[in-house]
């Protein structure tokens, strides 16, 4: 097995693997001889590290993305795919999702910026050279 550098400690990885396997925090605490409160803290910090890592990747994608689109307040959500695909085409980038996938992503990640199919707060769409879409 290859060794990778990670933002997670070995202990955090162990706890996350055991949680993923269905064990409770109490069961994990008994198994690795610590307290349930300590397991809770380890799991919390691991999840925080994962979220920070995700945000770092989003920011990096923003730096390297050749396409950035600002979706303005008042835009109908159903028109966003057309806007995104047109801008990607102008830049020669093939988007790796379809309209439904893009709308689903927007609803999942930007639900606070949408109300009744309308954008109520500006947000940005970045598209990497490989066609990955990131919402900021």
Image (tube, rainbow, N blue to C red):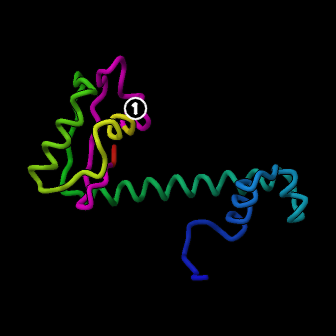
Is 61 one of the magenta-colored residues?
no
Where, by quadrant of the figure, is residue 65 drawn? bottom left
Q: Can residue 115 be seen from the camera position used here?
A: yes
- Which residue ends up furthest to the left in the rendered image? 90
Of 78 and 27, the residue lying toward us: 78
Q: Position of residue 131 (x, y in %)?
A: 26, 55
Q: Is residue 10 above or below residue 76?
A: below
Q: Position of residue 4 (x, y in %)?
A: 55, 77
Identify which residue is drawn at 29% across, 21% down: 118
Q: Secondary structure at mark 1?
A: helix
Return the residue at label 1: 107
Is 53 placed left or right of 77 in the picture? right
Is 128 placed left or right of 45 in the picture? left
Write the start and end of the magenta stretch as one range: 106-133
Identify which residue is drawn at 69% across, 71% down: 10
Is 79 placed left or right of 24 in the picture? left
């Amino acid at each position: 097995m290859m060794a990778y550098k990670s933002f997670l400690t070995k202990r955090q990885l162990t706890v996350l693997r055991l949680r993923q396997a269905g064990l409770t925090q109490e069961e994990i605490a008994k198994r690795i001889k610590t307290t349930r409160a300590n397991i809770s803290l380890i799991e919390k910090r691991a999840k925080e590290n994962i979220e920070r890592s995700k945000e770092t990747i989003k920011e990096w994608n923003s730096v390297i993305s050749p396409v950035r689109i600002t979706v303005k307040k008042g835009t109908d959500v159903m028109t966003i795919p057309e806007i995104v695909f047109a801008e990607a085409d102008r830049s020669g980038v093939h988007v790796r999702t379809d309209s439904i996938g893009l709308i689903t992503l927007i609803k999942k990640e930007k639900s606070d910026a949408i109300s009744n199919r309308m954008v109520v707060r500006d947000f940005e769409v970045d598209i990497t050279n490989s066609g990955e879409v990131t919402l900021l």
